[in-house]
Image (cartoon, helix red, strand yellow):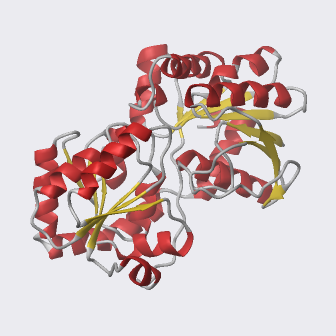
Amino acid sequence: MKIAMIGHKRIPSREGGVEIVVEELASKMVAEGHDVYVYNRAGHHVSGAENDIQVGDTYKGIHIITVPTSEKKSLNATIYSILATLHAIFHHYDVIHYHASGSCAMLWLPHFLGIRTVATIHGIDSQRAKWGGFATRYLEFGEKCAAKYADELIVLSEGNKKYFKEKFGREATLIPNGIGKPEILEAQAITERFGLKKDEYILFLARIVPEKGLHYLIKAYKQINTDKKLVIVGGTSHSNDYVSKIKRAAREDDRIMLLGFQQGQILEELYSNAYVYVLPSDVEGMPISLLEAMSYGNCCLVSDINETASVVEDKGLTFKKGDVEDLKEKLIQLLDNKQEVHSYKITAAEHVLSKYNWDDVVARTVNLYKYGAKVF
């Protein structure tokens, strides 16, 4: 099949879960013999590095098409989705696969031109706290377009499936994200660079945006008497005011370390050597970082929203969403009980690796391209 993917920022990239998903799907589809084109956005990379993928290049056999857009957050997704869609409709794809609700605002056009469309909603973006005004309305319009016009609609969680059924009367197909088995690394580079050693830190690893709930974690952590550091890893995404707030809060406690965006060996060592991984989100789709943390055998503490609690099941611990006191108590429980942490570490990796598999995700997605939801 000749397949187009629209909606991510760029690949290769770890700027967010959507980028990881698009790269995994596209590269594995190429390996199966499909012809895949992805529409990258031009512009700033969260790592600060310039993207060296140029127009017309290929990456892992994937054709890269780079689309100009605006750096202004309220216009970025709008301009990109319009230009990417206009390009795509003239290039004879068998299917155009839209990722995330912002890009889906243009899905109606190929639909009315008779081009097969598939939408994956990675999370209910209109609920994310960083947006407002025009951007929120645009994201809501994208959700409506996905529900009304997509030939097939994919969601990553039961919560999102319920959302589309109740709000739009649209049945969606649940295809969760996948994960691969990682290599566990000893603490070397993180010790040399940051002074971090195995089991001596609590890890938060996600974008620094309000809906990830980092402010709850910092507030709870500051009330705990512990020698374990709080290590915060992640780039920003259109949330400068929030980042400034987080930096001010972190400066008040010298146990808190802000490491910014990390990848490669540093990232792998951070996952491999954490005492506890914490994800206190208010809103999620299906967080790749949580799957990754569990695949490394981490004890995970997450908010009790469906999108995270359903991943950890009984192989991790949950706290009441937005409840700083409950988060503090659960952290103290884990800090005081090494045996409990160890028991979660033993079961986490086996659980997540057996349940979430990229090969299965790709097979189900390609079948949906070809045959629709009837195959499920």
Residue 148 picture location, percent across and down: 60, 15
Total marks placed: 0
The residue located at (75%, 53%) in the rendering is 29
- Between 338 and 181, the residue placed more toward the observer is 338
Quadrant of res 108: top right
Drawn side of residue 374 relative to residue 95, left or right: left
Residue 46 picture location, percent across and down: 56, 51
Drawn side of residue 70 relative to residue 68, left or right: left
Quadrant of res 9: top right
Q: Quadrant of the N terminus?
A: top right
The residue located at (47%, 17%) in the rendering is 133
Drawn side of residue 83 relative to residue 259, left or right: right
The residue located at (23%, 75%) in the rendering is 342
For the question of whether residue 339 can be seen, the reply is yes
The residue located at (21%, 39%) in the rendering is 322
For the question of whether residue 307 can be seen, the reply is no
Q: Is 77 drawn above or below residue 289 in the view shown?
A: above
Residue 26 picture location, percent across and down: 72, 51
Q: Quadrant of the C terminus?
A: top right
- Between 106 and 40, the residue placed more toward the observer is 40
Drawn side of residue 99 relative to residue 38, left or right: left
